[in-house]
Image (tube, rainbow, N blue to C red):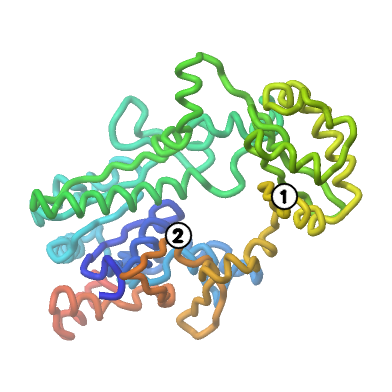
Amino acid sequence: MKKPLESIRLIDLTHMVSGPYAGMILADLGCDVVKVEPPNKGEGTRRLLENDPDYSIEGMSTYFFTLNRNKRSICLNLKQKEGLSLFYDLVKEADVVLSNFSPGVTKKLEIDFEHLKEINPKIITCTVTGFGETGPNYKRPAFDQIAQALGGGMSITGQSKDKPMRAGIPVGDLSGGMFAVMGIQAALLARNTTNKGQHVDISMLDCQISMLNYMATMHLVSGLVPEPIGNAHFVHVPYNTFSTKDFPIVIAAAGDQFWQGILDVFDIKKLRTSKYKFAPARQANKELIESLLQEKLITDTSENWIKKLEEKKIPCSRVNNFEQALQDEQIRYRNMVVKLKHPNGTEAEVPGNPIKLSDTHEDSFSSPPMLGAHTDEVLYEWLKLNPDEIKRLRKKLIID
């Protein structure tokens, strides 16, 4: 076994970002992920920006290209009785069914856990929704920014409480996908003991609350409501973003042990006083200290300042744009930018797999599938359907 989850079969019913991201991570780890798509157009992101030359590859959107690598695609009409019956046959051979429909859709389609466990008692189902599948408000519609807003994190992001700022990356969607992966793997481990499947209910809002972590506890203990402070820190100084002659940099001096190094690098006479030796005094004079540092920093390049700061072992970094981040030698060394082929042969680079295992780790990435490209293959492998039966199903528009 070259990948840790190679024995696991997963049916992927997902669309957009949160669900496909979970399926992508599991596929990278070796799961046999079969993406079930509706006939004709397939999953929604296939054609998103398909005609934009900057954001599509051979007519396939970069959304779909990235999130559906290492997966196979079959076209199956779940709204026809025979199509649903065929889906149930696939469930008998599967370990996991992953979806991110709106709450209630899986029950309406009769593909929820209560239906599927009667077909396969060992099946694990996982849904990723905005608010979970229980509670007074679980049916509310949700997208990434809704989860960010309701989850509290948006209120402390940015420079002002009057102008809240969402995270630049879709952390509402992506965290839902990541927690789904954790939940599915936990359910798979539990099944080894119980010999039964179970349902994994992931709420994007729950995930946002979980990631508030110690800051939530600080509020619950103190009653104080935090406000945004930009890129600064409520304890440490200097801990902020600063402009230089070319690119902005971050200095993150999280602790008194870095202060002497700051003095040595910047050699600012006004800061050479014993009162700034400890954090509380520096925090009380934060604006003055950081303004004096900024006056110095703007006189030289980011590269030169980072070299001086690193010599004193002070945590610092250039604020990379996408080009700089994705060309970083550390990122490239750890295979976090990889080449992925379109089924037609065109290559493009995409983010790699961040999970590095010492034994069962192999980085390999197959093309994101064309719509229904593996229908015949999967139906034969999983269900042993012969070509005549597959031809009959296709003629009846059950598959495509």
**Mark 2, secondary structure of its residue:** helix
- Say if 332 sits above or below 158 in the image: below
Instruction: From this view, report whether residue 273 is shown above or below residue 109.
Output: above
Q: Position of residue 342 (x, y in %)?
A: 49, 79
* Residue tagged 2: 44
Q: Residue at x 60, y 30 (%)?
A: 156
Tell me how many marks there are.
2
Question: Cα distance, mark 2 to mark 1?
Answer: 51 Å
Is 339 placed above or below 207 here? below
Quadrant in which the C terminus appears: bottom left
Q: Amino acid at mark 1?
A: Lys
Residue 164: percent from left, percent from top: 64, 31
Q: Around disc 1, counting alpha carbons within 10 Å, would you say few (fewer than 14), some (14 to 19), or many (20 or more)?
A: some
- Callout 2 touching callout 1 (CB < 8 Å): no
Q: Secondary structure at mark 1?
A: loop
284 horizontally vs 110: left or right = right
Measured as percent of width and height from the top left, residue 353 is found at 45, 65
Image point 42% across, 51% down: which residue?
18
Q: Which residue is mark 1?
A: 312
